[in-house]
């Protein structure tokens, strides 16, 4: 791939509220005592008025800044598996909120946990074709069944990448993909909650078999040895899974990036890009960053950091969003904000008067 194309800006967003897992475990102890082993740490929790659209806008603003010229952006892609509208262009709503030109193309991308990486590769192809810069956004706010392991493992969040050819801070030099209808979880149309298979099946027959193929293809395309990888990003809530992948692929253990699961949970589609934003904020020129994600197969991107990485800083960045977190210990508030618990709002709350 040409070294003149890649990431020219990045950003992220993590909701301020962080639900204490211990509060969830305590509330469900009577029903699911087996959750006690997951009582450590917190998970990010979207507020009652936050959804993938609002979080994507916040991540984009983190990447763009208030004074940036946005006229160069000709395409906006929004990747998510929890978009609020089934028949309305969610990316179009985001574009309007960002005051982008109406002549841009806005695209929704969904269907798997690796949708964001697919969007990055599609966006890169558009940049190389000369259409202009591409803004790739990813956001998720998944619902789970109460007292489930997913309720503790998941988190809410968003990430943003600006792709272009001027001021490239990280070149995308390798790509690998494996498309297999391996079912680790699924959600049918009309349903709100995923149906998930057991962890051992997903870990041993899915991740361990498919992800190394995608990683190997990305490394081979770039002509980079596994030992040259400085940062390995692989979102997962499975304990030690990143280390197992590193060993299987010949990547140094020291390259494994902390997935932030103990602090914000695993945020779904945006998590790989969110971790990439965290890494780019501290990466050194010349380093190689390998980003991979599992979902209906696997996908991997290999990036090489340039000298320009020191010239860009997001408005707040992942570190800033993490620092502003406030612990929430009310489990019923969490359920209410997820619209899984209907609270009495009184007579005057029975009629919802929507804004014109």
Image (cartoon, rainbow, N blue to C red):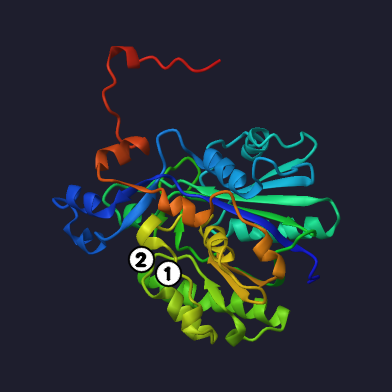
> Residue 20: x, y in percent?
28, 51
Asked if one can make out residue 171 in the rendered structure from this viewpoint, the answer is no
Asked if the residues shown at circle 2 and circle 1 are in contact, with their CB atoms under 8 angstroms apart, the answer is yes
| Rendered position, 304 above or below 190 | below
Q: Which residue is mark 2?
A: 198
Q: Secondary structure at mark 1?
A: helix
| Rendered position, 300 above or below 132 | below
Left or right of 33? Residue 236 is: right
Left or right of 174? Residue 295 is: left
> Residue 43: x, y in percent?
36, 53
Q: Which residue is more in the foreground, 320 or 165?
A: 320
Given the current orientation, which residue lies at the most extreme top position?
348
Given the current orientation, which residue lies at the most extreme right position?
130
Q: Which residue is mark 1?
A: 202
Q: Which residue is more in the foreground, 138 or 81?
A: 138
> Residue 86: x, y in percent?
57, 37
- In which quadrant will I find the N terminus? bottom right
- Residue at the spot x=58%, y=48% of the render? 315
Q: Secondary structure at mark 2?
A: loop
Mark 1 surroundings within 10 Å by alpha-carbon count, few (fewer than 14), some (14 through 19), many (20 or more): some
Q: Which residue is more in the foreground, 99 or 334?
A: 99
Left or right of 297? Residue 108 is: right
């Amino acid at each position: 791939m040409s070294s003149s194309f890649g990431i020219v800006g990045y950003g992220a967003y993590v909701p301020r509220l962080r639900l204490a897992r211990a509060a969830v475990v305590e509330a469900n102890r009577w029903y699911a005592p087996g959750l006690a082993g997951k009582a450590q740490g917190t998970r990010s929790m979207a507020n009652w008025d936050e959804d993938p659209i609002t979080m994507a806008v916040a991540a984009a603003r983190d990447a763009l800044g208030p004074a940036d010229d946005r006229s160069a952006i000709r395409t906006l892609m929004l990747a998510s598996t929890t978009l609020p509208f089934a028949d309305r262009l969610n990316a179009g709503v985001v574009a309007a909120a960002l005051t982008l030109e109406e002549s841009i193309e806005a695209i929704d991308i969904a269907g798997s946990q690796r949708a964001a990486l697919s969007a990055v590769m599609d966006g890169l192809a558009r940049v190389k074709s000369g259409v202009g810069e591409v803004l790739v956004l990813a956001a998720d706010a998944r619902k789970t069944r109460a007292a489930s392991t997913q309720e503790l493992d998941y988190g809410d969040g968003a990430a943003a990448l600006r792709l272009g050819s001027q001021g490239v801070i990280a070149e995308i030099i390798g790509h690998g993909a494996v498309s297999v209808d391996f079912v680790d979880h699924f959600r049918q149309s009309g349903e709100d909650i995923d149906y998930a298979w057991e962890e051992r099946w997903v870990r041993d027959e899915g991740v361990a078999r498919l992800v190394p193929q995608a990683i190997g293809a990305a490394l081979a395309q770039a002509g980079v040895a596994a030992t040259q990888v400085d940062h390995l990003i692989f979102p997962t809530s499975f304990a030690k899974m990143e280390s197992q992948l590193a060993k299987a692929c010949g990547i140094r253990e020291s390259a494994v990036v902390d997935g932030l699961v103990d602090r914000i949970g695993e945020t779904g589609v945006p998590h790989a890009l969110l971790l990439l934003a965290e890494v780019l904020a501290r990466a050194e020129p010349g380093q190689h960053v390998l980003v991979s994600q599992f979902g209906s197969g696997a996908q991997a991107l290999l990036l090489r950091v340039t000298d320009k990485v020191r010239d860009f800083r997001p408005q707040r960045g992942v570190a800033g969003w993490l620092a502003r977190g406030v612990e929430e210990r009310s489990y019923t508030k969490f359920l209410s904000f997820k619209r899984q618990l209907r609270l009495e709002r009184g007579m005057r709350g029975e009629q919802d008067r929507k804004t014109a």
